[in-house]
Amino acid sequence: NAGVMQNPRHLVRRRGQEARLRCSPMKGHSHVYWYRQLPEEGLKFMVYLQKENIIDESGMPKERFSAEFPKEGPSILRIQQVVRGDSAAYFCASSLRRTGLDGGYTFGSGTRLTVV
Amino acid sequence: DQQVKQNSPSLSVQEGRISILNCDYTNSMFDYFLWYKKYPAEGPTFLISISSIKDKNEDGRFTVFLNKSAKHLSLHIVPSQPGDSAVYFCAASDTGNTPLVFGKGTRLSVIA
């Protein structure tokens, strides 16, 4: 039973390019969350999705960032026209229940985005 | 504004002694609290949790204490082991309404 799978593990993009981060939740989990960790900072919530629906995107920057969780396939976090300030570790998590009780969320290993 | 605060960025403890990691929160709607452990280049892993109906939860060497009136929780690790060296994140939830809110983390170093 594989855990939360994120790819790629490392991603280097030049300023102005697009970054696409993928996340496959744990089997049976229908709730997906994206968090960002800037250097020396904690985990900041970005977006919460269920299949085909964005439930809460209150932590997502209004421009250049988008997320989806299609009926088939992984969840995708897309960053358009990346800037140096987007360099961070992006973590995806999934849970069985919306509340995240009984163990909270299961996290993937993250994608480390470097913008050069 | 930070709803979950971990005011100590780092902590060093000798092997075999007790490690105490602290966490404060401001949102009185939070009713479920968790601790996560994170090693470098890995994602956070769940360690222990506590519901607001309790004031203590124990799991082996790990105990979490909750003081609702002070909006404070702490994680005790006894005895501390070198493998416990990691960053520990405190997280809180307004159950079912908001995604987990994390603190900035405390880096624990257990010295042999």
Image (spheres, rainbow, N blue to C red):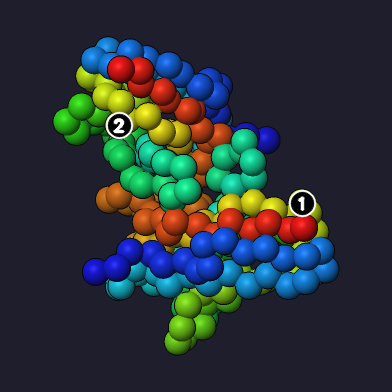
Is A3 placed above or below A99 here?
below
**Crowding near the residue tagged with mark 1, few <14, some 14–19, many ≥20 C-alpha atoms within 10 Å:** few
How far is mark 1 from mark 2, CA to CA?
33 Å
Is A52 placed above or below B2 here?
below
Res A92 seen here = yes
Residue positioned 44% across, 56% down in the render: A109
Q: Circle 1 is placed at which residue position?
A: A85
**Frontmost residue, A15 versus B30:** A15
Circle 2 sits in a helix, a strand or a loop, which is it?
A: helix
Residue positioned 30% across, 31% down in the render: B83
Is A6 placed above or below A85 here?
below
Determine the residue located farthest toward the left in the rendered image.
B60
The image quadrant where one finds the N terminus of chain A is bottom left
Could you tell me residue B74's position as x and y percent?
38, 23
- The answer as to whether the residues below labels 1 and 2 share one chain is no
Residue A52's tag is none
Res A57 seen here = no
Determine the residue located farthest toward the bottom in the rendered image.
A72
Quarter-wise, where is residue B9 in the image? top right
Could you tell me residue B35's position as x and y percent?
38, 37
Residue positioned 31% across, 40% down in the render: B47
How many numbered marks does the figure carry?
2
Callout 2: chain: B
**Crowding near the residue tagged with mark 2, few <14, some 14–19, many ≥20 C-alpha atoms within 10 Å:** few
Q: Circle 2 is placed at which residue position?
A: B83
Residue positioned 57% across, 61% down in the render: A10
**Frontmost residue, A53 versus A17:** A17
Callout 1: chain: A
**Frontmost residue, B44 versus B94:** B44
* Amino acid type indicated by mark 2: Gly
Could you tell me residue A103's position as x and y percent?
30, 49
Looking at the image, do the residues carrying marks 1 and 2 touch, with CB atoms under 8 Å apart?
A: no
